[in-house]
Structures are given as C-alpha cells and as structure tokens.
Amino acid sequence: MWHIIVNPIAGRGRTQKALPLMERALQDRSISYQLHMTKAPRHATELAKGLVQNGAEVVGAMGGDGTAHEVLNGLIGSQATLAVIPTGTGNDLARGLNIPLQIGATVRALSDAPTRTVDFGVDTDAAFGVILGLGFTTEVMTHVNKYKDFLRGPLAIAAAVVKVMHTLTADEMEIEFDGQKIHRKTTAVFIMNSCWTGGGMYVTPQAKLNDGLLHVCLVNGISRLDLLALLPKVYKGAHVGHPAVEFFTCKTVKISAARSMTKMFDGTVYGSTPVDAYIVPQGIKVLAPSGGRLVLN
C-alpha cells in the first residue's frame, strides 16, 4: 500500500492535472494506494507523522520540493520509505534521485525502483533534502512564491532572478566548517545535499545524495552584471572556477550574519539566522531508480 500525500496547489495546477494520470498509472501497475490531500502549509508533515505512527511503509510526496521537504520532515526517525512524485516547480530532489518528471514514467520508475538510503541535512529550524539557502537564493524563492499564479517551473525562477537582481546585496558573515572559521561578505549561500537546486541549476557538481557530506557554495561580493552573466553558466556547472565563487565540503556548518536573514529550505522560506546545520548520513529511505546522483547505484 502506498500512502500518497498530495499538495493539490503545487506546480501552478500541474499537480491537479497529473492526479488522475497518476491514479491510472498506479492501477495499471496493480499498486494499491490511498491519497491524503494537504490543506495548509506544514500539513504534509503532520500527515506523514500520522501515517508512520499507523505503520505506513511507503509514503509518497506528490508536489514539488516543498512538498517533499514537508514529508521528509514527517518521516525522520521512522522506517518508512519516501516516494517522490514530482509535479512541482523545481523538482530537484527527484532530479537527484533519477526520477522522471513525466507522471506515467514516474510511476513506472518508482514501482520498479529499489529502496535505497540517502542523506539529509538538519538545521535548528528544519531538516532538508536539497538545500538550505541564505541571501539571494532566499529572495528569489520568496518572489517565486509571491507570484506563483503567473509563471511555472524554471521560467518562474528565471523571472524572479531578474526581479531580485535590482536589490542585490552582500552580507558580512562568519562561517564555520567543521570547526574552522572564515569571514566573508557574501551574496548567496547554498548549503547543499543535492547537486541541483532552482529547477536544474547545477550548483555543487560534486555533491551526491549519499556521500555523507554537505556541499557549500558561496557567491561572494559580485556586481549585478557579473551575477547576471554568471547565472546561465550554473545550469552546466560552468561557474566552477569563477573568482567570486567558493566551494567547501563539511559535516557541520554554522553561520552568523551581521543582520537577521531568512532561510530557504527546499524551496520553502521560513526560519532565520543563525544557521547550525549538520548532515545525517544514510538517514532516510527512498525509492530511487538506478543512476542519478548516488554514490552506489
């Protein structure tokens, strides 16, 4: 039995359209299932917690990275397996797990996929499967969510980047990686578990979902024009080597900033600095087809 938590508003209507197609695909594969519809932010976490308390073995998250984020937070500490059914805006966790984005192919791939274990990050405000972001990253996602009725998918993210560019700032930060402190004036912080975020931006090319590490990308003080020129390169990982971009790997990261800064977890904006995050290796079970950004396939 698959218990599928559905965020009906995810993907600017895409989830609603995909729902009957998903049910048909599940029936064609003779997979028994039960749907659980979310009604408000954080409801998916409550639903997931209730399901595992009642013995659910496979819990699906149908929506975007934000829905998967909420379900993951509800499954932590359980033996349930997460099945990501991507119908949202970014779908970066699914991308890292090698899950197709077309709904029929999604169901076929998940029904044949083995159960694997992957890492997740934990901060004081939440756990995360893809990213904990600060600065420019948070501002972009805030804009995406504000205007969610107008644009969809990567186009929505690209439009938000252009809009947010006009208020670009760099913040003084003290950053501690596994006990080693540095100071930077930073425009954007990406604390990554996956290599992808923002609908396919290849931010940390070396990151794998079960390598036991957090991969941190810092975009330090940079002009608006230079950032605008840099961003298209990120989709191919061609930002690596840029003088304003630094990479670090660690098991723990702490960040304090000169001003209070809002956090972004897997496309969902909430919480505020300081950051006190760490990796939980192999901490969550997932259905993941062969391939993708995994150390062991």
Image (cartoon, rainbow, N blue to C red):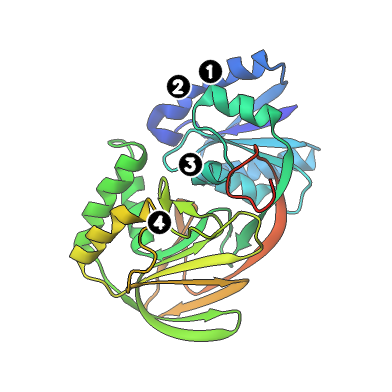
Residue 258 visible here: no
Q: Quadrant of residue 36?
A: top right
x, y percent for residue 140: 33, 55
Q: Can you identify the residue that label 3 sits on?
A: 91
x, y percent for residue 292: 58, 44
Residue at 57 percent across and 44 percent down: it is 68
Residue 50 or residue 57, whichever sits in front: 57
| Mark pair 2, 1: CA separation | 8 Å
Q: Amino acid at mark 2?
A: Lys
The disc label shown at residue 17, or none:
2
Q: Earlier in the sequence, mark 3 or mark 4?
A: 3
Q: Amino acid at mark 4?
A: Gly
x, y percent for residue 93: 54, 46
Residue at 49 percent across and 68 percent down: it is 216
Crowd tier of the residue under label 3, counting other residues whose Cα lies within 10 Å: few below 14, some 14–19, many 20 or above:
many
Residue at 49 percent across and 75 percent down: it is 274
Residues at marks 2 and 1 touching, judged by CB atoms closer than 8 Å = yes
Say left or right for 37 vs 12. Answer: right
Crowd tier of the residue under label 2, counting other residues whose Cα lies within 10 Å: few below 14, some 14–19, many 20 or above:
few
Q: Earlier in the sequence, mark 1 or mark 3?
A: 1
Of helix, strand and loop, which one carries label 1?
helix
How many marks overall? Answer: 4
Q: Earlier in the sequence, mark 3 or mark 2?
A: 2
Residue 118 or residue 13, whichever sits in front: 118
Of helix, strand and loop, which one carries label 4?
loop
| Mark pair 2, 4: CA separation | 33 Å
Q: Can you identify the residue that label 4 sits on?
A: 237
| Mark pair 3, 4: CA separation | 18 Å
Q: Earlier in the sequence, mark 2 or mark 4?
A: 2
Q: Can you identify the residue that label 1 sits on?
A: 21
